[in-house]
Amino acid sequence: MLKVAKNSDINFAKFDEKNPYFHIINALKGAGRLAGMKILDIGCGREPRYQILCRELARLGCVVTGVDTECKNEKGNPHFIRSSVDDFKTKERFDAVISSYFFGYVTSDWARDGLGKKPKDYETSLLKKLHGMLTAGGLSVHYMNEPWSLSRSDLEKTGFRIIKFPNPVDIFKVEDGLCVLKKWD
Ligand SMILES: C[S@@+](CC[C@H](N)C(=O)[O-])C[C@H]1O[C@@H](n2cnc3c(N)ncnc32)[C@H](O)[C@@H]1O
């Protein structure tokens, strides 16, 4: 598995192709101007040293909400909400929903006591739920350093158009772990 830079070593002033955060930010830039973009980061990290993406996007002018089961509630930009994505409800609509190192690490009610098994359709249902939180034409961008378990047709069933499909077998380049989906207008 490819090693990526430690969070503390990241210099956002210089593009680093080995760092997934740059690829996520680039995918968002492809959709238009970053400034003012409303972004939801799921599994955003429990503390500042993991909340890199949320904080960098806010610095770039985006309006960011981060949700994580282990973060502290914090108002401002980014706005952090301590919640499981499964319980998270909002009437807000976002221009993009993103995640880094979340799919593959996500746990939920089914994992309690280490006995549960992830239901087969857990990820597709989650993507469908996120689809409902996006504005028309909104993006869903996810980086995984674990092989992605969903097929193209699984993804299409979630209502998105596939812009970039992650390499399902193994991840040799950081770019291979990136999944970019667009909500049909
Ligand atoms: C490997 S960390 C990634 C953190 C951050 N995104 C980063 O880039 O470093 C995975 C995060 O997902 C969170 N998480 C796992 N399951 C979750 C769930 N069901 N709802 C919300 N957050 C969850 C964990 O608390 C953890 O902070």
Image (spheres, rainbow, N blue to C red):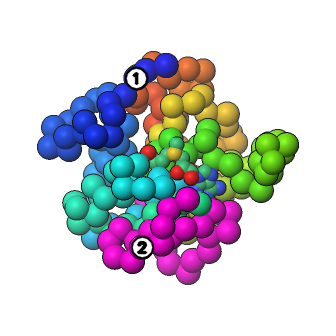
75 shown above or below 151: below
Tell me: residue 84, above or below residue 154.
below
Q: Where is residue 33 in the image (x, y as percent from the top left)?
A: 24, 61
The dot on residue 3 is 1
- Find residue 70 and report its horizontal and vertical position in percent: 55, 59
Q: Which residue lies furthest to the left in this view?
A: 13
* Residue 40 image point, x, y percent: 46, 63
Q: Is mark 1 on a helix, strand or loop?
A: loop
> In screen coordinates, is 155 left or right of 185?
right
Q: Which region is colored magenta?
A: 70-96
Sort mark 1 into few (<14), some (14-19) or many (20+) by Cα contacts within 10 Å: few
- Residue depicted at x 48% and y 55%: 46
Pick the residue in front: 4 or 123: 4
Query: What is the number of the mark on residue 74?
Result: 2
Q: Which residue lies furthest to the right in this view?
A: 115
Residue kind at label 1, given as amino acid type: Lys
Is any part of residue 40 visible from this angle?
Answer: no
Which numbered marker is on residue 178?
Answer: none
Secondary-structure class at tag 2: loop
Nearer the camera: disc 2 or disc 1: 2
- Residue 146, image x, y percentages: 57, 30
Give the residue drawn at x 68%, y 49%: 107
Which amino acid is tagged 2? Answer: Glu
Residue 138's place in the image compared with 27, above or below, is below
